[in-house]
Image: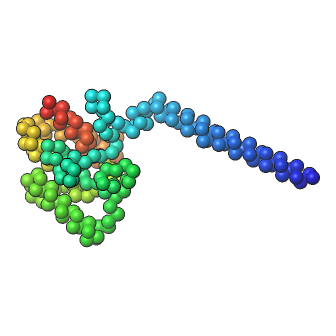
Amino acid sequence: MSTARTSARQLGVALRAVAILTLALGLVYPLVVTGMGQAVANHQANGSPVTVDGTTVGSELIGQSFTDKNGAALPQWFQSRPSAAGDGYDGGASSGSNLGPTNPDLAALIEERRTAVADLEGVNPDEVPADALTASSSGLDPHISPEYARLQADRVAAERGLEAGEVRALVEAAVEEPAAGVVGGSRVNVLKLNISLSELDT
């Protein structure tokens, strides 16, 4: 009898503990953290959206393709680096290609991209930077190197009938320096650059 009462008491304590912890960690804690995020870093907590005239056109954190329905580069826009995430920059399928550096398929793909970029930009294949040839490990990188952005400036200017120097200045203004001066490398957010370009073109 005593053993049964002890077991029942222990079961009751365990059930109350589960209920309290479920309430605290499953409801209260998430609500507090979400509220703090909205109050302190609303922009980041909501996915760092990029808006134009009040309409969300993308995120600072996820790249986009500036291509036609067949995947061909639209020459009037700066191009992003390749993406292996789903059909390209698919946030639900974040992934690299998982092809190793000695994989012949990767080597062939790099050469194919090198030729395509060189033809698009009218440059020697040796001038094509690495980030124009390879996808990032997430497949979602919204940035390209300043070198790749500079390579594209003359083509974009010609396609839009703009002064090349004006577009080059736009690229330089879009260069983001490493965080705290040491973390990461210099980079250019392609979506932001293309938005600036469209504003320049109006």
Residue 186 in view of the camera: no
Q: State whether residue 77 appears in this view.
A: yes
Q: Which picture quadrant has residue 108?
A: bottom left
Q: Is residue 189 above or below residue 126?
A: above
Report the quarter where the C terminus lies.
Answer: top left
Q: Residue 7, percent across and down? A: 84, 52
Report the residue at 24% width, 43% height from top.
190
Residue closest to the eye, 124 or 35: 35
Q: How is the image coloured?
A: rainbow
Q: Could you tell me which residue is drawn at 13 percent across and 33 percent down?
A: 201
Q: Residue at x 43, y 36 (%)?
A: 45
Q: Looking at this rendering, what residue extends furthest in the front direction?
A: 69
Residue at image coords 69%, 40%: 20
Count of numbered circles on the image: 0
Depicted 12 relative to depicted 98: above or below: above
Q: Quadrant of residue 101?
A: bottom left
Q: Position of residue 82 (x, y in %)?
A: 25, 54
Q: Nearer the viewer, residue 91 or 21?
A: 91
- The image shows residue 119 at horizontal and vertical percentages of 10, 56
Q: Relative to 136, does residue 40 appear above or below in the rendering?
A: above
22 relative position to 172: left or right? right
Image-based side of 6 in relation to 111, left or right: right
Q: Position of residue 11 (x, y in %)?
A: 79, 49
